[in-house]
Image: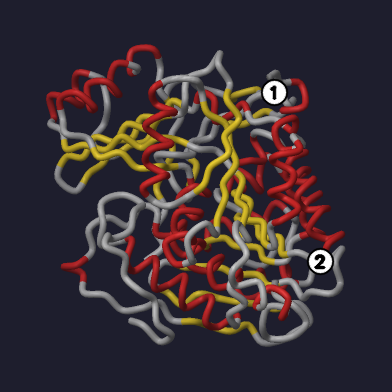
Amino acid sequence: MFSRGVCRFASGTGAYKTARGLTVPHQTLLVSRVCCNPAIFLPSCQKRRPFHSTTTTTPQSIKMAATKEYRLLALENPLLDIQAFGSDELLAKYNLKPNDAILAEEAHKPLYEELLNNHDAKLIAGGAAQNTARGAQYLLPDNSVVYLGGVGDDKYASILKDAVKKAGLRVEYRVEPTQPTGRCGVVITGHNRSMCTDLGAANHYGLDHLKKPEIWSLVENAEVYYIGGYHFTVCPPAIMELAKEAAAKNKIFILSLSAPFIAQFFKEPLDASAPYWDYIIGNETEAATWAEAQGHATKDLKEIAKLMANLPKENKQRKRVAIITHGTEPTLVAVQGEDEVKEYPVLAIDKSLINDTNGAGDAFAGGLCAGITEGKTLEESIHMGQWLAKLSIQELGPSFPFPKKTYEPGSH
């Protein structure tokens, strides 16, 4: 169920040297939300301008706060998905392949306007963690989720804000007027989808925004933090600020590995955040790549889940939970200090109902976060994630049906 796409660099050979001093080979990279998160790396954000508890359920303090607003705060890289049905002629015009994902060059920039003006495009608030935030808000009471990230000062930002407003998600974007809002053009031909991404302002989030009093007050108010791993390419200090706040205040810190290249090429900031993980989420490829990057010889996913769960931990009031999704195979869950790795079978679905598996992993994380935020048991939170993923794959793109469907314990 939780599929992954393939991201290829748009052009060039050899290696890509980032401004953070990292050399990344130009190679095929598996990603969680391919059209929204290709691998691109920019300078340190510091230089830019302007839960599982030791019991089986979430702490009672969160349960009692059922009417509290914006209990869940998410951070990553927002993009506007512009999805439309196209033709082979349209692909040829922009030198696109039927089933591919690239970073936009100048020749691709007119594609976004063409999709908007001539192809009845569907607009979706994209970016992996923003998909997850929308998914969590879909299940939670109104005004439960706030999302942070960077956009430009342009019409695409306005369209993006309108899209998230329809989803009921509150966003607090850092506006970078010198960069366009990140966009992902998706040309659908038959069962293929060609994705062309201009990340733009999404890679210009800075710690200055997080520390603004009006934003930091949202951080202090929230009980659960969700971080998409792609943000390690943008502003690791912002991730660490949230991690330390969570540990100091005994709040819940959830991290998604997001893509194999994060564990490979951003090992240092990822490792720095590891002691603060209350939940760590990844698919089978991301987990295996993490283990290899850490020097572990095992390829056994259950053993890898236990390795993740039992890393040293800063906040000892909570046991860490490691979650590995594995396509249509059962979801694996390891809890710190426990020998058993539990398996949770995914929910069955008729193949004829599957429309688009892109973003199913983001939807799973959204349902999981909703359950955690509401103080559900770990088992029910996993089930909520699987239920929401099942809904998502019946839609076009990483979206959810409206009018809303209501989750009930044991729903299939």
Residues 373 and 270: in front is: 373
Residues 67 and 223: in front is: 67
In the image, residue 157 sits, relative to residue 77, either above or below, namely above
Location of the N terminus (image quadrant): bottom left
* Amino acid residing under circle 2: Asn
Q: Which residue is mark 2?
A: 250
Q: Residues within 10 Å of mark 2 (few under 14, many from 20)?
A: some
Residue 361 location, x and y as percent?
45, 59
Please give left or right for residue 360 compared with residue 50 in the image.
Answer: left
Is residue 289 shown to the viewer in this render? no
- Label 2 SS: loop
Residue name at image x 79 percent, y 74 percent:
318
Residue name at image x 81 percent, y 49 percent:
272
Residue 43, numbered circle? 1
Please give left or right for residue 132 compared with residue 209 in the image.
Answer: left
Residue name at image x 67 percent, y 40 percent:
232
Camera-near label (2 vs 1) is 2
Residue 124, numbered circle? none
* Amino acid residing under circle 1: Pro
In the image, residue 79 sits, relative to residue 143, either above or below, namely above
In the image, residue 259 sits, relative to residue 308, either above or below, namely above
Please give left or right for residue 320 compared with residue 81 in the image.
Answer: right
Residue 392 location, x and y as percent?
33, 61
Residue 144 location, x and y as percent?
55, 59
Labelled pair 2, 1 in contact (Cβ < 8 Å): no
**C-alpha span from label 2 to label 1:** 32 Å
Residue name at image x 19 percent, y 23 percent:
117
- Label 1 SS: loop
Residue 54 figure quarter: bottom right
Q: Earlier in the sequence, mark 2 or mark 1?
A: 1
